[in-house]
Image (cartoon, rainbow, N blue to C red):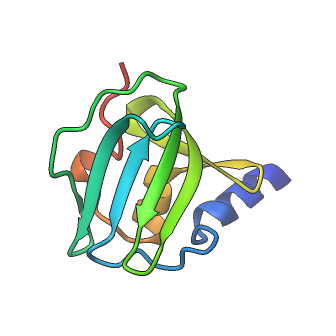
Amino acid sequence: MLSWLLGLTLALAPLPQLPWIPPGSELRLASPDYRKVYAVYQVQQRRLVAPAKPMPVAAATELRVIIRTPDRVHMYNGLSASKGDVWLKVSGDKISLNELLTRTYRLELPGGKVLPEVR
């Protein structure tokens, strides 16, 4: 029960060192070595917009979530999940990136997904 409450609290709280994702920011999903970029999204008027079609990602693939705001770059570790979500590893817990972006940062996701469909 305590783990569930902590997970809910973290899902409704901003990411560490990232209190706001303003328009003009960019979100990238890349491989751990940064050689492959699976998806790029830009924040436009509180919506995430993909300028190019994202690459498919297999389930349980390690990812780096890179969020570039106008003043700095924030990086987080993640794991691809089913239905186009990413589980972020924050403070020892797993948090849904979709939930975080929609509930905490109030962003509209393209088609309700952050990642393309998992193969």
Would residue 54 be visible to someone looking at this image?
Answer: yes
In the foreground, 101 or 26: 26
> Splitting the image into 4 quarters, where does residue 75 fall?
bottom right
Q: Position of residue 98 (x, y in %)?
A: 43, 52
Give the residue at x 25% y 37%.
54
> Splitting the image into 4 quarters, where does residue 21 fall?
bottom left
Vertical side of 11 occupied by 69: above or below: below
> Splitting the image into 4 quarters, where does residue 91 fall?
bottom right
In the foreground, 82 or 23: 23
Q: Position of residue 104 (x, y in %)?
A: 49, 70
Query: Relative to residue 87, is residue 37 drawn left or right?
Result: left
Give the residue at x 80% y 51%.
3
Q: Position of residue 108 (x, y in %)?
A: 28, 62
Give the residue at x 35% y 79%.
22
Vertical side of 9 occupied by 32: above or below: above
Would residue 1 be visible to someone looking at this image?
Answer: no
Query: Relative to residue 53, is residue 87 drawn left or right?
Result: right
Q: Position of residue 84 (x, y in %)?
A: 38, 36
